[in-house]
Image: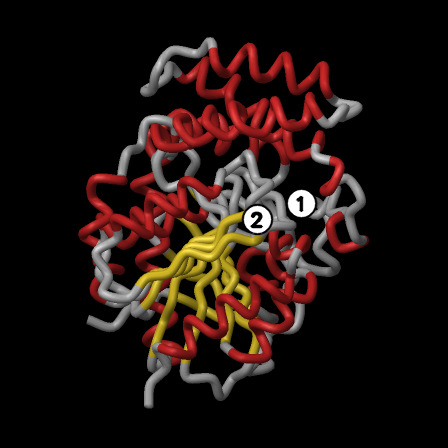
Amino acid sequence: MPYDNWRRGGLAALLAVGTSVGAAGCGSDEVIYVDVGDAQLRVHVKGDPDADTLLLVLHGGPANDSSLLERGRAAARLEDHYRVAYLDQRGMGGSWGRLDDDQLTVQQWARDGAVVVQVLQELYAPEQLWLYGHSWGGMLGTLMLLDTDARDRVDGWIEVAGCHDGTVLVEESVAAFEVRAPEQIAAGSEYAPQWQQALDVVTALPEAPLSLEDWLVLTEYNAEANGWLESLTAKTEEYAYIGHLLVRGNESYTGWLPSAQKVANGLVEYQHGVETEERLGEIEVPSLFVYATQDFVCPPGLGRRAQARVGSSRSAFVELSRSGHLPMFDEPDALADAVISFVDEEAPR
């Protein structure tokens, strides 16, 4: 049955919800809103309107929005090749909706995403539709392919520095500290005391599965460690994205900090206990895993293990050696090249 509960942004949106939207109704650059019953999901659709392939971008977080992934050279190159749809997840960015405790589940976010897939297919009729998930978006995309009807609608899967399994994240993060911390200490890093403290703490954690409290301790050190790597301390202007959650030009932003904090608290509790590795064989679409050597938030071991277990007859793992958790800014051309070469091999002929 066609899904018709969507609308384009523009004057109708301004009158209906009291917000303004930018660049709506321009074919290759428009905003649509997808009604999933108890939420309105904002999707910014950009890129080549004549492309046969559409990428649905699933942002990280979970308390984040799509604006970060719309920036920079990697995004521009993907938009030159494909039609690209940037989804603001429930309660984030220009999306809004119920954030009751019973809604704050990974499964709800996956169901939301599946509806968006259906709408994009019916509205734009791409010959192929691929999911592209970064960080938390890796977990969201994985569950969309495992537990929703998106598995029958999606033609390919790209996971960039993603976390699709909370237990595997623990194992790979501890292993990364055991290797990299002694290297940094021996090299005389100015952050040697921090590396030693992190190593002492994470290696003393119990074996997975961790309690939520211990899991949060580990993930905090994961995030800090990226800042202790000297090779990642000199960032480009594109990488200085502080405030991107609050500044979106003339577009509306309804995911203010109280909402973002509630989403983070609710979904992180679910995320840490999600285990999908043993089910990855159920994913049979072409799958690309792009990870970064210097990423502690989602270490590259996650991607290696996923690529080895995914059920697709065609899969690939790419490791970017000079990147941290945001390879789209650290090595934008290398990331874009990896995606374009893999997707185009599957392009309709």
Query: Which quarter of the rendered picture does the C terminus lie within?
Result: bottom left
- Name which residue type carries label 2: Asp
Callout 1: few (<14), some (14-19), or many (20+) C-alpha neighbours within 10 Å? Answer: many
Instruction: Tell me residue 56's x, y (percent).
Output: 44, 64
Q: Position of 313 compared to 113: left or right?
A: left
Q: How many marks?
A: 2
Q: Residues within 10 Å of mark 2 (few under 14, many from 20)?
A: many
Circle 2: element type: loop
Q: Quadrant of residue 348?
A: bottom left
The residue nearer to you, when weighing 6 against 171, is 171
Q: Position of residue 43 (x, y in %)?
A: 50, 62
Q: Is disc 2 in contact with disc 1, using a CB cutoff of under 8 Å?
A: yes
Where is residue 173 shown, x and y percent of the image? 47, 29
Q: In percent of the image, x 59 and y 70: which residue is there?
A: 10
Q: Which residue is mark 1?
A: 245
Q: Give the residue drawn at x 60%, y 30%.
A: 223
On screen, residue 339 above or below 271: below
Q: Earlier in the sequence, mark 2 or mark 1?
A: 2
Question: What secondary structure is marked by label 1?
Answer: loop
Name the kind of residue labelled 1 in the image.
Answer: Leu
